Image (spheres, coloured by chain):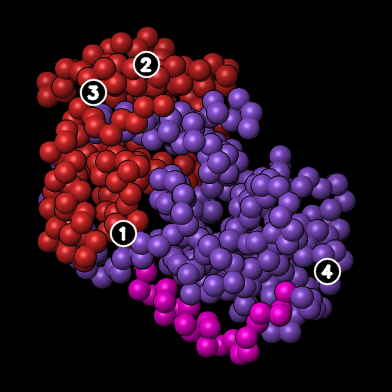
Amino acid sequence: MSSREQSPHATAPDRDRLTSLLRRIVDGDQQAFAMLYDELAPAVFGIVRNVLRDAAMSEEVTQEVFVDLWRQAKRYDPSKASPRTWACTIAHRKAVDRVRSEQARRRREDRDHQSSVMVAADTVTEVIERQETRGEVRAALASLSPAQREAVTLAYFEGRTYRDVATLLSIPEGTAKTRIRDGLQKLRTRMGREL
Amino acid sequence: MTTDLHQLAPLFAIDALEATELTQFELHLSTCVTCTAEVAELRQVVAEFSDATASEPPASLRATVLSAIARTPQLDADRKAGSELDRASLDRDVSHTPLASNVIEPVSGQVASLADARNKRRRRLSAPLAAAAAVLMLVAVFGLSRGPGDTDVISEVVSAPDAIVTELAPASAAGDAMLEIVWSADRDQVVVRGSGLSELTPEQEYQIWFLVDGGAIGSATFVVENGAVNTVLDVEDRDTGGWGITIEPVGGSDVPTSPVIFSASM
């Protein structure tokens, strides 16, 4: 499998700049960390907010993400992911952990009323329509079938499990898995061409 | 590994697996280069969208974050060779050698206070505990076993400021079994996570033992589903120098009735 060390937006200069900041951060350089924060905070906060849809909670989790980046800086391995991918992965993971624990709490609190889960926002559509979205990102998302787009939106952008996706869309779990998987593979193919 | 597990890679990459499948897939990932590469690639692909979904956080957050990191020590670089950029490196800090007490690190949260808590705990323990696993002793107080699905409680324990993660070593190198205990003494709870464990008969349960000076004290019991466990158990408020696991009749035993199958000292 080919390794995709370079990504369209995380261009080589972007990656190099962040990597050199991380090198300083490893030495405990807080000023370098402030610069890293300025570079990555909008990306991290955006991911977290899409999943959590709650401003206060999103701030908390964003803070947790950055504290974690600081703590783990010495363990960052540039051969495995770009700094931006590393930060985005941690951001998504922490947001998902938070939203699932909140969901479980709510389910417990109103287990008497079968809680009706809302199919929320069309994040992907919003992204496609945003003016500043780069052409290739827009094209990749637009290449998904409506069913794949819906499944990927719920699973990645909103941080649902495939089982939640199946429930929300009233489709079998196997179908949900397939739609998410095929959607992601298609995105990979489309985005991969620009490398 | 089966094709089925490979097919979970995309779902894992975007955090869309069910909690019960996570441990099993992580174990698979640690030995599968194909899935490791696929997960890395897909994480990069979805990270591409972070520009498009970017959103400025409130300006005040910057100062909050910078003041938080100024109080937070960084973790050392050393970790098990070959570990992946996955959950393991995101939110777990596992002691790699079961007997090395000083590599146990906090899971997250208030790091500074953890060292204090740990030192305090250690001071309250008297003699070395290395031999404790061998000699198992009497008192047994049972915790409540909850089913899987208490993910909020699990994450509360795992992120408790005093949480200590311990990876237990199997007594015999039997297959792929792995087990770890995350202990919050303040909450009197542990999270037990494991996979590749033997299925038990309906009359049996796994039991956790506190290893203390001169013996072991029986604590909570748990069961596995498809060889995996990820659950919270209430445990007693006590010091421990380590953990042991045995298979016991349902409800647990006062003294171990079978050999220790996993153990770790802290």
Q: Name the residue at the bottom extreme.
A: B126
Label 4: chain letter: B
* Discs 2/1, front: 1
Does dot 1 land on a helix, a strand or a loop?
A: helix
Along the line of sight, which residue is nearer the eye, A102 or A111?
A102
Q: Which residue is mark 4?
A: B256
Please state if B206 lies on the left or on the right of B50 as rendered.
right
Q: Which chain is red?
A: A
Please tell me how crowded label 4 is: few (under 14), some (14-19), or many (20+) other residues with Cα within 10 Å.
many
Circle number at residue A186: 2
Res. A155 in view: no
Front-most of B96 and A2?
A2
Residue A195, label in figure: 3
Q: Is residue B124 magenta?
A: yes
Residue A193 included in the magenta stretch of the image: no
Secondary element type, mark 2: helix
Q: Give how far apart the Cα atoms at labels 2 and 1 are.
A: 34 Å
Q: Secondary structure at mark 3?
A: loop
